[in-house]
Amino acid sequence: VELQEAALARQKQLETEKEDLQMQIGKLQATLDGKEAEVTAAKGEVDRVERDTGCRLETAERESAGARDVLDEWKRRHREAVQAHSRDLEELETARRRLADVEREAEKLREEHRELTGDVARSQAQSAEETEALKSQLQAAQQRATGLAVEMQRYQA
């Protein structure tokens, strides 16, 4: 009987422990289910953050590529402007040299014009003197011719 009572007591104790363990298992299962739900929610959040981050990264890469394109375009425009400016400076220098050459040529031509004008004036003065001298010689020759014609008539008459 004692053994039986001890066995019944032990059985009750074991059943109590079993119930306690089942309650703990239930609590642990509920906690595990809660943790699994948290893990699932965290995974969902991580997936969402990864998608958002991926989208932001793609957007940033597109914007960066766009900014590089804009920068490259401005660099190209700058190079073209510098080259055009260089060509303009070369053309300006060429025009200045041509202007200096033309001004020297014009001065030389003005000097030649002054010299030729002086030569023409001297030639005209000399021609006028020669003309006067020739007129005087002609008049003298005509007077001699008239005198000779008169003398010839006297000898013929």
Image (tube, rainbow, N blue to C red):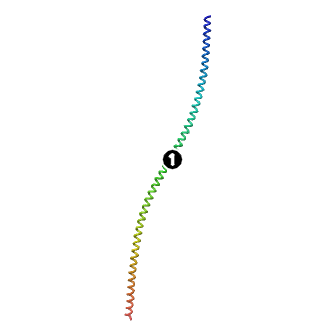
State the residue in front, 147 or 46. Answer: 46
Is 133 situated above or below 32? below
> Given the current orientation, which residue lies at the most extreme top position?
1
Q: Position of residue 127 (x, y in %)?
A: 40, 77
Quadrant the C terminus occupies? bottom left
In this rendering, would 44 be left or right of 71? right
> Helix, strand, or loop for circle 1?
helix
Q: Quadrant of residue 17?
A: top right
**Quadrant of residue 61 within the rendered picture:** top right
Residue 140, percent across and down? 38, 85
Up the image or down, 147 lies above or below 84; here it is: below
**x and y percentages locating residue 76 in the rendered image:** 50, 48
Residue drawn at the location 39% of the way across and 80% of the way down: 132
Q: Is residue 96 above or below residue 61?
A: below
Kindly identify the amino acid type of the residue bearing the numbered disc 1. Answer: Trp
State the residue at coordinates (51%, 47%): 74
Identify the residue under disc 1.
74
- Say few, some or many: other residues with alpha carbon within 10 Å of mark 1 (under 14 / 14 to 19 / 20 or more): few
Q: Position of residue 110 (x, y in %)?
A: 42, 67
Q: How many labels were placed on the picture?
A: 1
Q: Which image quadrant: the N terminus?
A: top right
Q: Is residue 137 left or right of residue 67?
A: left
Which residue does the image show at 61% across and 9% down from the upper left?
9
Residue drawn at the location 40% of the way across and 74% of the way down: 121
